[in-house]
Image (cartoon, coloured by chain):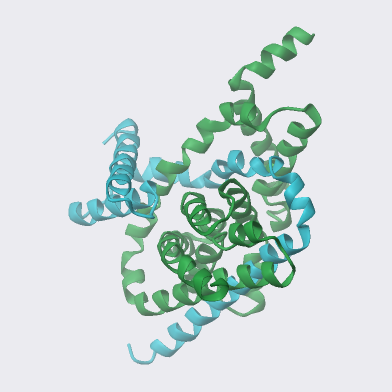
Chain colours: A green, B cyan
Amino acid sequence: MTEIWTSLHDNPLTWLVLTLVVYQLAHGLWRRFHMNPLLNPVLLSIAGLSAILILGGIDYSRYFAGAHLVHFLLGPATVALAIPLYRQLGRIMRSAGALAAGLLAGSVAAIGASLAIGWLLGASRPTIMSLAPKSVTSPIAMGIAEQIGGIPSLTAVLVILTGIVGAVGGAWLLDLLRVKDERARGVAMGTASHGIGTARALQMGEVTGAFSGLAMGLNGVATALLTPIIVKWLFG
Amino acid sequence: MGILASITVLLVCQLIGETIAKVLALPIPGPVIGMVLLFIGLLVRRGLPADLDKSASFLLSHLSLLFIPAGTGVVVHARLIAQEWLPISTALVVGTAITIAVTGLTMTFLLRRGKPAQ
């Protein structure tokens, strides 16, 4: 019995399979409950996998050695966002001005709110700096965190949690604020919650998804340029 | 264009993007540059190959799965997050809500204002 466990534990395939199985269970549960945003599959999967790793005393690095293959696909999937973008090109060009303004306002709001809330509630300096770039896709966010004195691996986690918050509550908040335009909804999701928000936006419709994917990419660039300036301005 | 060729196209765009980012020391990740390159490629080609569309749709329909391995890294920082749970959770929830509201409302206002002029 111990032998089987040791063999499974040492085989990276175990952790790849586990990731796929847990995700499909979470996805099934979410669908059964009429896609209730509170049962977000990413949230459920991360909670389930974390519980397994902690209870089983399994090192994250051991787990990641297997799950890495899934993580790797983020690269080509990001490239693939060019396709909804291409199909919505006409709509994007027609709303370019509003898009640029909304994006810039959102980018500044994301950085400013993270820094202000972290500071007001007494977070440590490295935590505040790790929070600042949390609305953008992880590779950009980690680079920014490093540059301004945050903890890049903590930022990676905060980025994903931010994505989940947006995916879970975004549509509800936009309904509450009566933001009905699919383009505005998409840009809001992508600016605040990068790829996870975009995954949710793609479920809301192709227009929403395309605008979200575009906003995610543009906000990555805007945040990379703006964060060091805003940090310097607020924290000297 | 077959499925294999489509996946190769996606990976080639990513590779070129990563190389550009590295050589020019850009703060933008390679895959995002790859997305721009593929987008330009589609504009130049004036058309979307059916298989590329199919492969991309498959990848994007399971986009949320791809964030799970990195997100599970929360276990590594569990102690720090527990210690500073109040500022972290507030920044996550309130910060994200403010961002969504500011972006959505700014865009709605400008789209509405722009309409009669068109």
Name the residue: 56% across, 58% down.
A197
- Residue closest to the eye, B72 or B86: B86
Left-right relation of A84 to A156: left
Give the number of marks: 0
Q: Where residue A68 sits: x, y (%)? A: 53, 32
In the rendered view of the protein, which quadrant contains the N terminus of chain A? top right
Q: Where residue A19 sits: x, y (%)? A: 63, 33
In the current view of this chain or complex, which residue is farthest to the left?
B44
Left-right relation of A88 to B23: right
Name the residue: 77% across, 34% down.
A54
Q: Where residue A107 sits: x, y (%)? A: 50, 70
In the current view of this chain or complex, which residue is farthest to the front?
A236
- Residue closest to the eye, A142 or B6: A142
Q: Where residue A141 sits: x, y (%)? A: 51, 55
Q: Is residue A1 above or below residue B13?
A: above
In the current view of this chain or complex, which residue is farthest to the bottom?
B116
- Residue closest to the eye, A62 or B49: A62
Name the residue: 32% across, 45% down.
B22
Q: In this view, does A173 lie above or below A123?
A: below
